[in-house]
Amino acid sequence: MDKIKVLLIDDEMEFVETLAERLELRGYISKIAGDGESGISRLANESFDVAILDLMMPGLSGLDTLRQIKEIDATLPVIMLTGHGSTKDGMEGMRMGAFDFLMKPLDINDLMEKIKLALSKSSKG
């Protein structure tokens, strides 16, 4: 099986760089976008198996980014992240087509399980 290609969209660069490194150590291919706009741009030019998307970002919000992701590729599984203790936006994201959401701080094993589950339930897997 080919390596799983993950697009990480998050404005917290230290967090997202560490997450990318941890995923790559586990055999994933990780690409980073520091905001919604650059995430959309990357997605328009490259294919990914799954996207990990932060809800709270300056500029294009996570929910607005999700809306645009689904316009580009309705089948792409998106796992949303929130570090602000609120599940309301995470639930809204799921209504808009996100596969699931996780709270920060993130457990890498939980994320990997969500990625595998998302791929098993999508046409990407």
Image: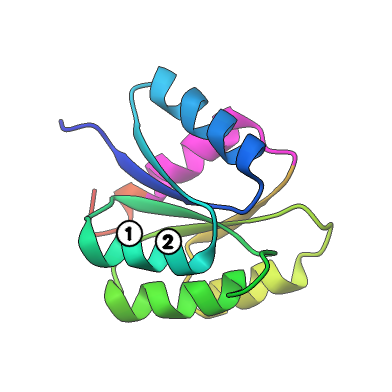
Residue for badge 2: 39
Q: Position of residue 89 (x, y in %)?
A: 70, 72
Which residue type does callout 2 highlight?
A: Gly
- The magenta segment is 105-118
Magenta region, main secondary structure: helix
Query: Residue at the spot x=61%, y=42% of the render?
Result: 13
Q: Position of residue 84 (x, y in %)?
A: 82, 58
Q: Are marks 2 and 1 in contact (CB under 8 Å)?
A: yes
Depth check, front residue: 34 or 7: 34
Depth check, front residue: 98 or 48: 48
Q: Quadrant of the N terminus?
A: top left
Determine whether the residue tagged by mark 1 lies in a helix, strand or loop: helix
Check the image and name the residue furthest to the left: 1
Query: Relative to residue 41, is residue 101 drawn left or right?
Result: right
Residue 109 magenta-highlighted: yes
Neighbor class of circle 1 (other Cα within 10 Å; few <14, some 14-19, many 20+) is some
Query: Residue at the spot x=66%, y=67% of the render?
Result: 90
Which residue type does callout 1 highlight?
A: Arg
Residue for badge 1: 42
Residue 112 vertical position relative to residue 74 in the rendered view, above or below: above
Determine whether the residue tagged by mark 2 lies in a helix, strand or loop: helix
The image quadrant that residue 122 belongs to is: bottom left
The image quadrant that residue 115 belongs to is: top left
Residue 111 magenta-highlighted: yes
Depth check, front residue: 73 or 15: 15
Question: In whole angstroms, how far apart are the C-alphas of marks 2 and 1?
Answer: 5 Å
